[in-house]
Amino acid sequence: MAFILGRWSYLFKDHNLNSNRGEEVTVENTIRKMFNTLEAKGILDITRIYGDFEKRKLLDPNLYKHGPLPKNEKINCFQAQKESLGNIFNIFQKDLLWQQFQCSYINELPDVFFEYPPYMHSSGKSYIYLYHKMKGEQLSRDWIERNLSLFHILELNEIKKEKNIIKSKSLDILGSFDPIRLHYLLNSEVLILLDNHLLVKKLNSLVKRYYYIFDLNEVQKFLENGQFTITENRFDQKRCLLEVGNSCWRYSTHYLFQMVGSFSFYLFIATIILLILTVIVLIKNIIKERRDAEQRKNSLQILTHEFRTPVSSMLFEVEKIQQNFNHIGIPLQDSMLRLSNDVYRLQRLVEKSSSYLNLSKQKVFQFQLKKFDSINDFMNEIIDHYFLSKLESEHLKIIYLQQDSYFYFDPHWMGICLKNLIDNSFAHGSPPVSLRLNLSNNNELMIEVSDQGSCSFKNIEQMCADFVKSNKSKGMGLGLKIVKKIVDDLGGQLHYLPSPTRFQIKLNRQKLEKIFYELQRL
């Protein structure tokens, strides 16, 4: 919103940002003012450096070829020796003379070898560049400076990057040209922007390629508080206000603020502040929603806790009636059975709801671990308490440990885990249901509950999602989630294996022993 308002104000103040004659005149005036204000660091006369027709070929980017230097092939050396012996006048052929020098048939080249055309070898390199690559270490430090006009201008860009090359202004400027900048030079553009310099030709000057050299840092400081900034246009930048040579002219930030005006600037700042305040309000609302959700959850916890007392009373009364079940009339016995089932179901819902509502707390379960000398006896007590009828009817089978041992359990929570898993097996699986115990050599106890059915869920994470249940389930779909949370808090693992359905609780005795002694110290 802030940027849209700023853009609208900008367009309202100045209807047309595209280049027009007004901007061109302003840029021309800026260039003239720069001439009068800044001192030129020198003059670059390309016509004098590359004066005759043959030397101007050293500015042609099409003649220069990138790539490795030409190799000295034996067959070429043989051909050069044969031709030199066949005709004495062949020594005036520059390419043949160079081939003889490469093949070491002659030790030195004539003094005027590099000064007469052609200057370019057939490989796309200049003869003097090839000589520099062969004899570079033997040449004097100012040799390149004296022979700059004999190199192809694009070769100087590579020489400039070499180590141990004497630095000079001429090499720095001529070596800054690449094929793109060279295109503007050949077209005699008014401005050419280089790495560290700005080449400027006098406006309306009839002399081609005669440039004044200005230091680029001084030019940038000159334009700093003015109307424009300049950058090099590399054909891949955004649209320029005005292009002069390879320079891209745009309005400066300082000038844009003046154009937009103080009102738009203050409007922009006010909008930003409005956005910040909106974000703060949203954060506060989110915090409030979370606090309200926590309060609602606490209310549900209290309500679930209060349900326990009447449910317990109802269970007590149902058990008393069941003891005198035969004294009830036959028409009322079916109703009594349905009532009894509903009361037990209500008890399970209260237990699961209470456990689930506590899952968000840091300490969900208050464990009271005890040391039991016999794992088999402990499991037998739980099964007798919850599933005695199933055990007597042989719908539930227990496979005890062959070698019994001690372990640490919380009787209440372990009873809830086994009750949930076995109830699920009877409700969703196929009997018989088996409870198998196994104690490994590393003191890891595995409690496996299995049945003969199959399960449609793919993994334990999918089954333990909130309120996920199968088509046969009559509960809230929280039982398995509670089991997994209990096992995780005890440092164990809950695994699920399909076909047939198996749930495995794995508990480590060392971890439980550590928790046991920590609870003893509290």
Image (cartoon, rainbow, N blue to C red):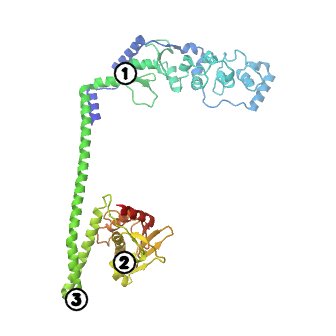
Which residue is identified by label 2? 381
Is any atom of residue 14 visible in this view? no
Which comes before the other along the chain, label 1 or label 3? 1
> From this viewpoint, which residue is outermost toward the top?
36
x 40%, y 19%: residue: 221
Q: Are marks 1 and 3 in contact (CB under 8 Å)?
A: no
Which residue is identified by label 3? 326
x 40%, y 15%: residue: 31
Dot in front, 1 or 2 = 2
Q: Determine the secondary structure under disc 1.
A: strand
The percent position of residue 144, horizontal first and vertical second, equals 62, 18
Task: Bin the neighbour count of mark 1 within 10 Å (Cα to Cα): few under 14, some 14-19, many 20 and up.
Answer: many
281, 261: nearer the viewer: 281
**Residue 302 position by quadrant:** bottom left
Q: In the image, what residue type sits under mark 2?
A: Glu
Which comes before the other along the chain, label 2 or label 3? 3
Which comes before the other along the chain, label 1 or label 2? 1
The percent position of residue 143, horizontal first and vertical second, equals 64, 17
x 73%, y 16%: residue: 110
Dot in front, 1 or 3 = 3
Which residue is identified by label 1? 228
Give the spatial CA distance, label 1 vs label 2: 90 Å
